[in-house]
Image: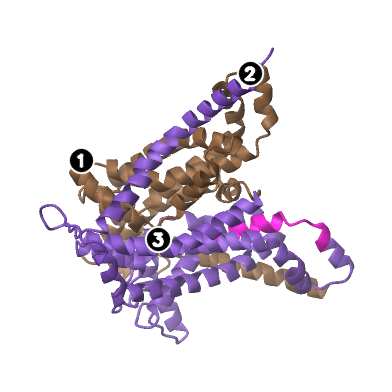
Amino acid sequence: MKVNPTATRNTSRRFTLWMLLPLLAVAGVAVGLPLVYTLYLSLTDFSLIQQGVAGFVGFDNYWQSFTNQALWNAIGTTGTYVFIAVSFETAIGLMIALALQKQRWARDFTRSMLLAPMFITPIAVGLTFRFLLNDQLGAIPYLLDQVGLSYDFLGSGNALFTLAMIDVWQWTPFMVLLLLAGLESVPKQPLEAARVDGAGSFYIFRRITLPLLTPILSVAILLRSLDALKVFEYVYATTRGGPGTETETIQYFTYQTGIQFFRLGEASAMAFILLAIVLPLIVVLFRRLESKA
Amino acid sequence: MVRQQLKTSLRVIFLLAALITVLFPLVWIALASFKTAPQLNDPSLLFFEPSLVNWKFVLEAGILQAAGRSAFVATVTVAISAVVGSVAAYVISTYKTGGSATKFGILAAQVLPPAVLVFPFLTLSYVLGVNDTLIPLIFAHLSFVLPVVTWFLIGFFDSVPRSLEEQARVDGFTRFKAFLLVVMPQVYPGLGAAIIFGFTLSWNDMFYGLILTPPNSTILPVAIAGFNTFRGVELGSMSAAILVAVVPVVIASFFIQKRLVQGISGGAVKY
């Protein structure tokens, strides 16, 4: 049978386009359209409580947001939160992954249980800790009290750290999951060779395991940071931005501006400023993932 | 030898501590859901006569209806994502259709902050008169579930050998039949994991639900948050409501943990 190569390429091309089309259509409605519409909103004085057509105001909203100290505070707060949470998650996650790798007894049970928190709806986690940390009814202040300690978990100066620790409780499992996979795909030969040569286990970890683990470690840190930036539920469940504005994160601040104060135009401009901050991280993540495939 | 034993015991103690840290809050919530209001005032109470009063209260407050709506939204979202996503993931993986721009778009959509998309869903739902339905929420959930499911599937298709499809073509299958009948069954386990994970993502989302669902017919995570403000803090009923949301997905998650890594990393890491 003789096949015309151009014809095959054409049918192949038409076939692939038809297969891709549904995705483009649904994503166009669910992502593309809202994105463009938010861009439009950000250039108007659209408000949920005002009747009539929104007026075009150019870059006023952006200018207003840029000069709004509260927005920069929220960005700073979110940055601090992400840094604290992701650092702890990386360190603890790595320790748990290393320990789990050697675990033989009740292996699958231990792993499943330790991974469970990442599948719980974050609002439930937030409310659970609000309950556990309550200074009159909570079990944790009670236990601390028994050993003579007292700590105001959601008080001024402590609240943001406490929120970050709630993040650590829920999302360290995500780090464990990825790092455990990374550890198990590390080739065994260099490890054994080093052991035969009499290298200590800390030396092996630092000089052999860690470098081999770096690609997945960086992907895990990026994914986690991008997700932690969106923190909303813990704030909503526990502090609502307080004390003062100490725990006002960017997602919560945008929600307040748009939904509680009805200023959709301004909130949309903030959302785009957030996007501009996040975009470079997404590009780095994409490069990392593509270079390995 | 002694050093080795010391290391092992340290490791076991560390893992036990981690396990207790994970389990303690969950067990405490489970206990609290069976305590009466006066019993909840005593944070040291471990042994008590269980009461069903909280469970009765949340059932009467419509927690199952909220769970039903959550399940409905998640099912529709995941069904659309699975069909649309597998078809697209196949050509993206096999023919590199759309190039890296498409792949970048898929990854970016997964991690996009919801604040960027939520306001249009809200205003458009009023313009189109669907603001008292679950339709805006389904579209909002599609904005992140579809990219995640597609991303997972690209990774799973990448690990299917090309020769399978070529053989099917030689045997006289059309391109679509080769995809549907020969390649697709190879990724069914991966598709299953992607479906359960996508369902979990939709089921767990609160931000979109809070803004896009009508107050009297809301979804589970928003309903749970409602117990926080309604007549002060109703800790017992809140705990019962939390369990309704948590137990099903945690059980489902046990079945997909192994495939999750491969999915999240787009096939780059196998477990």
> Which of marks 2 and 3 precedes in the sequence?
2
Give the main secondary structure, helix, strand or loop, of the magenta stretch: helix
Q: Which is in the foreground here, disc 3 or disc 2?
A: 2
The correct choice, above or below, for A225 with respect to B184 in the image is: below
Identify the element where label 3 is drawn: helix
Which quadrant would the N terminus of chain B be assigned to in this image? bottom right
| Residue A29 in the figure: left or right of residue B186 | left
Chain A tint in image: purple
Q: Are marks 1 and 3 on the same chain?
A: no
Front-most of residues B184 and B63 = B184
| Magenta range | A173-191
Residue A270, visible in the rendered structure:
yes
Membership of A187 in magenta stretch: yes
Disc ID at residue B128: 1
Q: Are marks 1 and 2 in contact (CB under 8 Å)?
A: no
Disc ID at residue A275: 3
Disc ID at residue B16: none
* Chain ID of residue with mark 1: B
* Chain ID of residue with mark 2: A
